[in-house]
Amino acid sequence: MRRSIYIDEFAHKSPIPNASRIGNIIVSGLIRGVDPATQAFPPTVEQQCAFMFANVRRCVEVGGARVEDIVKVTFWMKELQRKPVNDEWVKMFPDPASRPARQIMEVPMEPEVLVECDFMAVIEESKP
């Protein structure tokens, strides 16, 4: 049975959940670098990356997983800049022997959006 995951602090404006879980798999929709306290986008890509990674953590945990369960992350950036993503990446995934797969692409975006991502997590069978 599918379970929708909604997070009020950075909910989608469309009628879709932040993520969905079936069994031990969680797949997110787009997660952006919005400040969950204000629902505003900070002006820099570094700030948006920090909020985006925090929002990923919140989303995966509300879904019943841990960041260690994430197996793939895809990033889209208005202007390809790997350093802001890499800085947050190594904070969230410090062990080089245990990092998810990832991809970064440059694409056109809404004016205030500088970076966004989605993820897939696979939860150990023994977890709820």
Image (tube, rainbow, N blue to C red):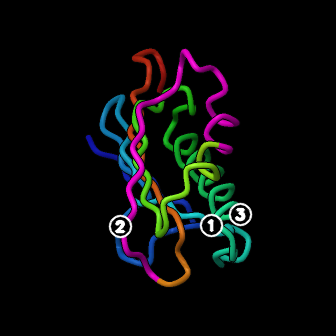
Asked if marks 1 and 3 touch (Cβ < 8 Å), the reply is no
The residue at 47%/69% (across/down) is 78
**What residue sits right under mark 3 in the picture?**
47
Q: Amino acid at mark 3?
A: Gln
Location of the N terminus by quadrant is top left
Q: Identify the secondary structure beneath mark 2.
A: loop
Going by the numbered disc 2, the residue's amino acid type is: Ile
**Residue placed under numbered mark 2 in the picture:** 16
Q: CA distance from mark 1 to mark 3?
A: 17 Å
Secondary structure, mark 3, is helix
Location of residue 97 in the rendering, given as x and y in whole percent from the top left corner: 55, 15
Residue 103 falls within the magenta-colored stretch: yes
Amino acid type at image mark 1: Glu
Residue that numbered label 1 is attached to: 9
**Pointer 1 local density, CA inside 10 Å: few below 14, some 14–19, many at least 20:** some
Mark 2 and mark 3 lie on one chain; the one further toward the N terminus is 2
Q: Residue placed at 62% from the left, 30% from the top?
A: 93
The quarter of the displayed image where residue 117 is located? bottom left
| Alpha carbon separation for disc pair 2 and 3 | 25 Å
Q: Earlier in the sequence, mark 1 or mark 3?
A: 1
Identify the residue shown where x is 55% and y is 60%.
7
- The reply to whether the C-beta atoms of the residues labelled 2 and 3 are less than 8 Å apart is no
